[in-house]
Amino acid sequence: MDALMPRPRAEVAPGAVHLPDWLDVDGQRALVDACRGWSGGLRQVRMPSGAVMSVRQVCLGWHWYPYRYSRYVDDGDGSPVLPFPGWLVELGRRAVADAYRTPDVEYEPDIALINYYDSAARMGLHQDKDERSLEPVVSLSLGDPCVFRFGNTEHRGRPWTDVELRSGDLFVFGGPSRLAYHGVPKTLPRQDTPDIGLPAGRLNLTLRVSGLSTS
């Protein structure tokens, strides 16, 4: 069906670009294998209100918890955050270069948030604004498709655009859309997805530049 009805590259908003099928099957399998190695750190984040996020999350480079970053899992066992691998920096740089059609882009992500969604998990509309840098956010999807809601920079209300993200899709947002509200109102049943080593659920990797001191 996709061969008959290809999904083209789309600029959803200024600086927000969707590249369907950006990762091939081998690339998706490799990323799932890497996530499996990090999965021991998956936990559900408790918000200041006491609510618990329905997704499970593990961080690389810097540990995020509401609404700050640390080199340690301060809201957990206090262990050092997992390192951010060099190959993931290269993948993020290639993603930004392809999204913005700029071959010599300078992009040095040092944060990865890896979220696992089961069929009931959701992510409310929010801004990624805990970083000191406004370099683009790179989002990679694996496994189950989802509805990705991309809104405006002022509030959680309309206007927004709903985009279906499937396994292997890339979404990059920066520039005037860097602080846009976004979220995942629902995951969707998997259909015709190649075997990538993820039997069920959705993995989402978001790469960011912290702008934080490394000292």
Image (spheres, rainbow, N blue to C red):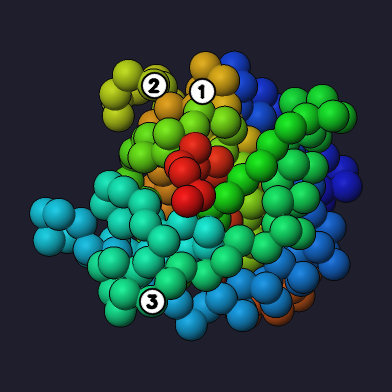
Q: Quadrant of residue 181?
A: top left
Q: Can residue 116 be seen at all in this image of the molecule?
A: no
Who comes first in sequence, dot 2 or dot 3?
3
Tag 2: Cα neighbours inside 10 Å, few (<14), some, or many (≥20)?
some
- Disc on res. 177: 1
Tag 3: Cα neighbours inside 10 Å, few (<14), some, or many (≥20)?
few
The residue that mark 3 highlights is 79
Who comes first in sequence, dot 1 or dot 2?
2
The three-letter code of the residue at mark 3 reads Ser
Mark 2 or 3, which is nearer the eye? Answer: 3
Front-most of residues 91 and 165: 91
Where disc 1 sits, the SS reads: helix
Where disc 3 sits, the SS reads: loop
Where is residue 14? Give x, y as percent.
59, 17
Q: Residue at x 75, y 26 (%)?
A: 100
Where disc 2 sits, the SS reads: loop
The three-letter code of the residue at mark 1 reads Ser
Where is residue 184? Give x, y as percent.
43, 48
Q: Can residue 27 be seen at all in this image of the molecule?
A: yes
Task: Spot the residue most to the left.
Answer: 49
Where is residue 62? Give x, y as percent.
46, 57
The residue that mark 2 highlights is 153
- Alpha carbon of mark 1 to alpha carbon of mark 2: how far? 7 Å
Indicate whether 29 appears above or below 37: above
Tag 1: Cα neighbours inside 10 Å, few (<14), some, or many (≥20)?
many
